[in-house]
Image (cartoon, grey):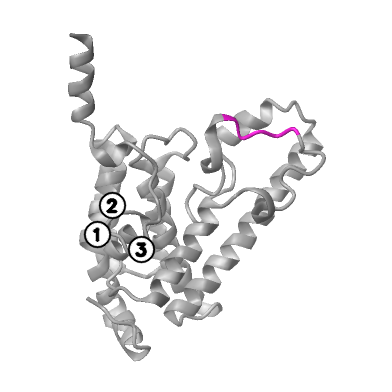
């Protein structure tokens, strides 16, 4: 009887909660599909290359890709059961420190100077990866890395980065992830302050905020946030600032749906 009950419960768990989410290039599911669903773009190699470049800055933390993490005096650091999601799975503009990282640090019994050095490594690595992301975003979308246009570049980078994280929250391995509300706040900043989405961005941001009250389960909340992004953000991008982005993308031959 107990086995039958367990089997029935498993059948009612959404399939996207059962495993980690892959990039899935060219597939109908995965991080790439999520990215296309929140942007008003038709599929292209240039955009898929951009998506994948950002994906790698989130999911490839080991060895040479995160130089010096395990070098002295931090050679005894361990991810433990958290795995690669312990690092870089926070909002694009988020602080590179989480309670989970602090937990692993506490197990090392380091002195304050050693901890400060570890934090500096993380800050420097986050800056390095963010530069990769901003450069890839600038090149793919023909947006500048300076002045006001840098804000737009940051907005598109944030939306892409945070959409990846929303996909991760709908899987079974969410223990290493930052509080989802911090990612939602990062998205709100991207839509209103960075993209300059005006009243329409404020309307969407209110919807995003409401998910914090309506969905206690972070998996359900993340799935709802992604639904809101898919429904609302493509049109927001096309209409923002009197259609500036629509004209910009058309000028550069970026096809839109």
Residue ranking furthest to the top: 1
Q: Are marks 3 and 2 in contact (CB under 8 Å)?
A: no
Residue 115 appears left or right of 27: right
Residue 118 appears left or right of 7: right
Classify 10 Å Cα crowding around label 3: few (below 14), some (14-19), many (20 and above). many
Residue 206 appears left or right of 22: left
Residue at the image position 53 percent from the left and 34 percent from the top: 82
Residue assigned mark 3: 191
Residue at the image position 24 percent from the left and 59 percent from the top: 230
Of tags 3 and 2, the one toward the viewer is: 2
**Disc marking residue 230:** 1
Residue at the image position 27 percent from the left and 62 percent from the top: 37
Residue 157 appears left or right of 19: right
Q: Locate residue 217, reporting x and y percent.
A: 30, 33
Tell me the SS state at disc 3: helix
Measured Cα–Cα span from mark 1 to mark 3: 13 Å
Q: Are marks 1 and 2 in contact (CB under 8 Å)?
A: yes
Q: Locate residue 200, reporting x and y percent.
A: 24, 65
Name the N-terminal-most of marks 3 and 2: 3
Classify 10 Å Cα crowding around label 2: few (below 14), some (14-19), many (20 and above). many
Q: Locate residue 58, reporting x and y percent.
A: 51, 53
Tell me the SS state at disc 2: helix
Residue assigned mark 2: 226
């Amino acid at each position: 009887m107990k086995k039958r009950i367990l089997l029935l419960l498993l059948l009612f768990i959404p399939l996207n909660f059962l495993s980690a989410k892959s990039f899935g290039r060219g597939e109908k599911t995965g991080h790439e599909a999520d990215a296309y669903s929140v942007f008003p773009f038709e599929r292209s190699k240039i955009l898929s290359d951009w998506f994948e470049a950002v994906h790698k800055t989130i999911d490839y933390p080991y060895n040479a890709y995160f130089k010096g993490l395990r070098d002295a005096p931090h050679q005894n650091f361990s991810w433990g059961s958290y795995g690669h999601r312990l690092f870089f799975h926070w909002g694009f503009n988020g602080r590179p420190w989480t309670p989970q990282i602090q937990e692993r640090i506490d197990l090392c019994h380091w002195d304050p100077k050693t901890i400060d050095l570890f934090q500096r490594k993380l800050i420097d690595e986050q800056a390095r990866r963010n530069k990769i992301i901003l450069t890839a975003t600038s090149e793919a979308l023909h947006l500048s890395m300076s002045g006001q246009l840098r804000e737009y570049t940051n907005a598109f980078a944030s939306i892409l980065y945070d959409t990846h994280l929303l996909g991760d929250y709908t899987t079974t391995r969410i223990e290493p992830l930052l509080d989802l509300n911090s990612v939602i706040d990062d998205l709100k900043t991207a839509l209103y302050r960075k993209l300059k989405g005006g009243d329409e961005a404020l309307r969407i941001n209110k919807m995003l905020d409401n998910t914090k009250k309506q969905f206690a389960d972070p998996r359900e909340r993340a799935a709802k946030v992604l639904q809101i992004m898919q429904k609302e953000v493509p049109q927001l991008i096309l209409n923002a600032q009197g259609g500036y982005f629509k004209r910009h993308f058309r000028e550069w031959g970026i096809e839109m749906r």
